[in-house]
Amino acid sequence: MTRLSGKVAVITGAAKGIGKEIAKKFAAEGAKVCLADMDESSSYALAHELGPPTFFAPLNVSEEDGWHAAIEQVLLRHERIDILVNNAGTLETGTIEDTDLALWRHIQDVNATGTFLGCQAAVRTMKETGGGVIVNMASQAAVRPRPSTMAYSASKAAIVNLTKTVAAHCADQGYNIRCNVVLPGAIDTEMIYKNQTADQSDEEFVTSVQSRYPMGRMGTAEEIAAGVVFLASDESRFITGAQLRIDGGGTI
């Protein structure tokens, strides 16, 4: 039997990158996957690739009404949600001096507020249907921030502490809801290249990133997805409020 057989899972930011690989691995493990994203064309293409019961629900994670609508779609189809993966996020560069308020708010809205709204919606739903699992996506930057990603690093640190408070609350209330967080290092997806400076070639950028990791390379989206499957499955049933650092030793 596959590890997520029959589980109903919502994955935000599922259209591409890490989210796409999580969706593919969840489907392969037997989950009924809802692809929650703003990118309709890519999400529909992925839903077609994975086949039923995978389906798409449009979602802007920073909007409370959008969460209500997406959750309602899932409940109409499956009557419960067993797993939520808060993967959607944005990365924009900027130091404390050159980040304006609009950019700060945008990054917090997507990363921190989006994860808060997802956790809140999931807890309110899961507690009525016997429990579930929440997996949040932070970053190595939450514990080892870089000056050039000030707002992003702050938002990811917020997610780490949000995860702990959600885990503690659910345990205190006896909800049978676990909440954990994954901290990826540099992962070879489109997002990482937002850190590339104008004067760097692709090769120079990759070399500079790899030099920061004891394992000497970037990670893959598949490696992050494998960690998320573990946290979402019963194999981790005694783990809550924990940080899983998948970072090639970057935070040693």
Image (cartoon, rainbow, N blue to C red):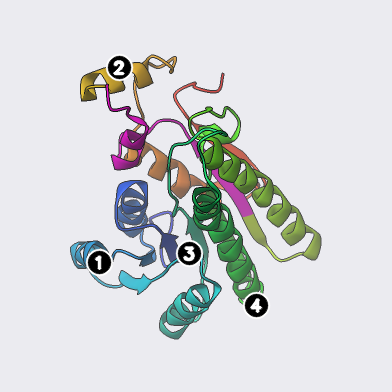
The picture quadrant where one finds residue 220 is top left
Which element type, helix, strand or loop, lies under badge 4?
loop
Vertical comparison of 250 with 115: above or below: above
Q: Earlier in the sequence, mark 3 or mark 1?
A: 1
Highlighted range, magenta: 179-199
Left or right relative to 251: residue 176: right
Which element type, helix, strand or loop, lies under badge 3?
loop
Where does label 3 land, which residue? 61
In the rendering, which numbered label is found on residue 177? none
CA separation, marks 1 and 2? 35 Å
Q: Earlier in the sequence, mark 4 or mark 3?
A: 3
Q: Position of residue 208 (x, y in %)?
A: 35, 17
Q: Nearer the viewer, residue 188 or 248?
A: 188
Residue type at tag 3? Val
Q: Nearer the viewer, residue 82 or 188?
A: 188
**Could you classify mark 3 by the number of other residues whose Cα lies within 10 Å: few (under 14), some (14-19), or many (20 or more)?**
many
Residue type at tag 1? Ala
Of circles 4 and 1, the one toward us is: 1
**Could you classify mark 4 by the number of other residues whose Cα lies within 10 Å: few (under 14), some (14-19), or many (20 or more)?**
few
- Image quadrant where one finds the N terminus: bottom left
Can you name the residue that lies furthest to the bottom here? Answer: 76
Where does label 4 land, which residue? 128
Residue type at tag 2? Thr
Where does label 1 land, which residue? 47
Residue type at tag 4? Glu
Q: Nearer the viewer, residue 24 or 39?
A: 39
Which residue is at 27% across, 21% downward?
200
CA separation, marks 2 and 4? 49 Å
Is label 1 in contact with label 2 (beta carbons under 8 Å)? Answer: no
Of circles 3 and 1, the one toward us is: 3
